Each structure stands twice: as structure tokens, then as C-alpha cells.
Amino acid sequence: MVAVPLNSFQLPPGPRGYPVLGVLPSLRSDPIRTFLDAADRYGDIVHMKAGPYHGFLVCDPADIRHVLLDNARNYHKSPLYDRLRDTLGNGLLTSEDSFWLRQRRLAQPAFHRQRLTAMADAMVDCAQQTVERWEAVASRGETIDVVDEMMALTQAIIVRTMFSMDLGAAAEVVNRTWPIINRRIGETFWATKLETTLPLPANRRFWRALQELDGVVYRIIAERRRSGRESADLLSMFLSARDEETGSGMTDRQLRDEVMTMLLAGHETTSLALSWTYYLLSQHPEAEERIRSEVDRVIGSGRPSFVHLDRLTYTRQVIEESLRLYPPAWGFSRRALGGDEIGGYHVAKGSLVFVIPFVIHRRRTLFPDPERFDPGRFAPDQEAARPRFAYIPFGGGPRGCIGNQFAMIEAQLIVAAIAQRYRLTVLRDEKVRPEPLITLRPKPGFRARVEKQTAGAAL
Ligand code: HEM
């Protein structure tokens, strides 16, 4: 980082944009290009006026650490999360301060190592069900929609591990309504409140979808209450929580917000991580081959489990490289509660700070030849040589992802379970590009042929 004398009157360099609107039009039409260009052109800290806000794009790992960890108390989630709040309410991802801290402490035990070991088993059950179902697909020479399949699989896993149930027919409701909701949130990130409250057809579709999804979430809660079943899962932890002063439990609305948050945050991102991994593997057959031989060596034809994870090192590195190139949570932002100093510049109270993993993971100084797919970047010596906060697919600091380890375990086990039986050959009829909604989706999606592994192919 270049030391710049603190100057409260001088803003960091950045694109000027339009009068009043600043760079808002380009952020609305192509946020990733806007952020990438800004970082390429102006460096590690960039000023961008976005409508009424002063925004700071921060790309230096030390500055990111400052915002996410060292001075995290000075930051709340930015108003861009308001759109997410319309759907998730005031759950773990969107709440703040002491309320957030209480909920985080309540949820944390559900992610302890001991629990993760047990959950790995459920993950493998679900993966094997998918793999079994593909048997018919493979023998008929048919194809699968990779994103849909990964979405359905990770959704089954989150419901099973966090709420100890199967959604049954309601899974269809989640699969149908969530894409509508996700798209609307992504489209309205930069919209005014008015644009999101007018009874426009797109808003009506969003409200209807949300109402249906709400129905599923309230049913999950009601079913557990009715059964009175005690379980060591997240839902039980929330249901049995009591306020220290009043002794009262969480309200149905609060439970709804937490269940909705976990349901959505817990499956969408991981399914995209897996989808991008298969997209990259289709372009790098040598990496796919290495995964197969690693899985063959470590697990053979046995059942994948928690104990294999440490030795599935290359599989893990491929997933990490996929999260670098296509981070599902491609960007997030904060609002400064008070004035601060970042990278030698004064950041006024109320400013927005943008932390964009998609951009940071492509900084040449941190990842040489950044567009090249190279899982070797995650070999221990290379990782150790990089500053902390250079690689942040799961964010960092107190608001970092609670499901980080869960997701990595899940992705490794799924890739292993698939590699034991099949090779996914991606069909390339259309050019796939990343679409930045709340998460980074492959547009227009892609299909793959499911081909059975031939015996000995992995040797
Ligand atoms: C590859 C998969 C995943 C990615 C890339 C990812 C990414 C992230 C990121 C970047 C954040 C921080 C957002 C911010 O700072 O504004 C976050 C927070 C969060 N994630 Fe994940 N996540 C993944 C999987 C999961 C899973 C599996 C779960 C649950 C089982 C989960 C639950 C959450 C929750 C509840 C938060 C909010 C935490 C808090 O503020 O206390 N995520 N995730």
C-alpha cells in the first residue's frame, strides 16, 4: 500500500460519472465491469459517487482487513442490503449490533466441528441420492441442467442438516420461487424505494413468490413446534433460545427471518460454487482427471466421509480456485457509521465502502496472471505468501460467513461422490458469462452429459 498523507479534503482518484447520478447508471447496467475498470484504472482505493452516496472501492488487503475486522464496529451493512431485507427480514445476514451478536452466538454451536462431522454424513446421503438418480440419465445418454441439479442438491442438504427434515413436495416451491426473488433483488439493488413498492408486474410477481416461499418457511417452523421433537440442529437452537431478561422465546416472525436466511444463504451460494467448478473443470480436463485419481486413491469405491477430507487436497484447491474466479458472493458493501481513515484518505460518515471479491481476486499483485485457472495457487506455500484478506470468498471478520467450513466440506464431498461414478461433460452451445445478481450466476446456465466412469479410468 502506498502511504498517502491523510487529507480530509482530498478524495482518492476515481471515475467522475454523470452530474448528480455519478457512476450509478453504469453500476446499474454492469456493476462488475464498472468495479473492475475502476480498480484497473485508479488503483487500490477508488472514489465513486453513486447517486447520493460517496462510495469507496477498497482493494488493498490491509484496507479490507481494516473495514471488515479491525474497525468493524464502525460499519453496518450498506443500504444496498435493504432489498435483501425485504426478503430475509432481520435475520443473521441483515441484522446489526447486539441483536445480531445474540443471534450469532445462538447459531454458532450448530456449526461446531463435532456437528459438522455428523452433518457430513447427511451431505453424503443427499449426494448419493442425486448420483443414484443420475444412473437413468446416464444410461439414456441424457443431459442435466447443472445449476438446477446443484441447487436441488444443496437445498436438500441445508434443510436436512439445519432443520432435520425433507421438504418433499415443498422443494418445488422453493426451486420455483427463489429464482424469481433472487432476480428481483438483483435487479433492484440500485433502485429507489418507489420502484420497488409500485404495483408493477415485476414487483407483483416478486410479492407472490415471496408469499409462497413464506408459506414453506412457516410450515417448517410449525411442523417442528407440533412434533415437539428435540434435535441438535439449528432450528432447535433457535426454538429453545430464551431472552435472559424476559425469559420469552423468539417470535414467529424472528424465527421466520432466521430460517429464511439459513435456507437461502445456506444453499444458493454453495450450489453456484459447485456449478462454476464444473464449468471450469469442463475447460480443464487435466484438472478433472487429477480429481478423479485423487478420489480413487483416497476413497476408492467406498463411501466418502469426513475423514477423507484432509487428503482430498487437490479437490479442495480446485474448489478454492473456482471460488476465486467466480465468487458466488461477488461483492458486498458497508456504510460508515462515523468518519474513518482508509488508505490515507478520510472517509466521511455515511459513505459506502465496496468490497468486491470478484475484483480483489483479479488483482495482478495478489494473483499473478489472474484470469488463468490454477489450483496450485492454493498450495500451502503460495497461500502463506499472500496477505490475509486477499482471498475473501466468505468475507471476513465478525460478519464473515458462518457456513464457511460447512460449505467447503459440502462441496468437497459432493465433487468426490460425483467423481466416483461420473464425468460431467458440459455442452457448449452457448457462451456462459457471470451474471451479478445478489449472487454470481452463470448466464444462461449450462447443461452437461452424465457419463459413467469407466473402470480403471482414474488410475
Ligand atoms: C460457497 C458457499 C458460500 C459463500 C461463497 C458464502 C459467502 C458469504 C459471505 C461473503 C458472507 C458475508 C457477507 C457480508 O459480509 O456482507 C456470508 C455470510 C453469511 N453466510 Fe455464507 N457463504 C456460503 C455458504 C454458506 C452456508 C453453507 C451457510 C449456512 C449453512 C451460510 C450462511 C451465512 C450466514 C448466516 C451469513 C451471515 C453471517 C453473519 O453476518 O453473522 N453461508 N456468506
Image (tube, helix red, strand yellow):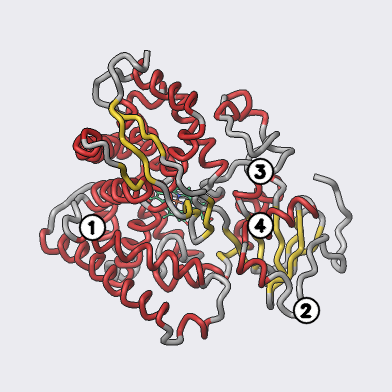
On the image, the x and y values in percent for residue 89 come to 40, 70
**Secondary structure found at label 2:** loop
Q: Which residue is mark 3?
A: 362
Kind of residue indicated by mark 2: Pro
The answer to whether residue 90 is above or below residue 345 is below
Q: Furthest residue to the left?
A: 227
Q: Residue at x 38, y 49 (%)?
A: 147
Residue 19, numbered label: 2
On the image, the x and y values in percent for residue 180 come to 38, 67
Q: Which residue is mark 4?
A: 33
Rounded to the nearest angstrom, the CA distance separating label 2 from label 4 is: 20 Å
Residue 157, numbered label: none
**Where does the C terminus fall, quadrant-wise?**
top left
Q: Which residue is more in the foreground, 227 or 179?
A: 179
Residue 171, numbered label: 1
Q: Are marks 1 and 4 in contact (CB under 8 Å)?
A: no
Residue 451 shows in the view: yes
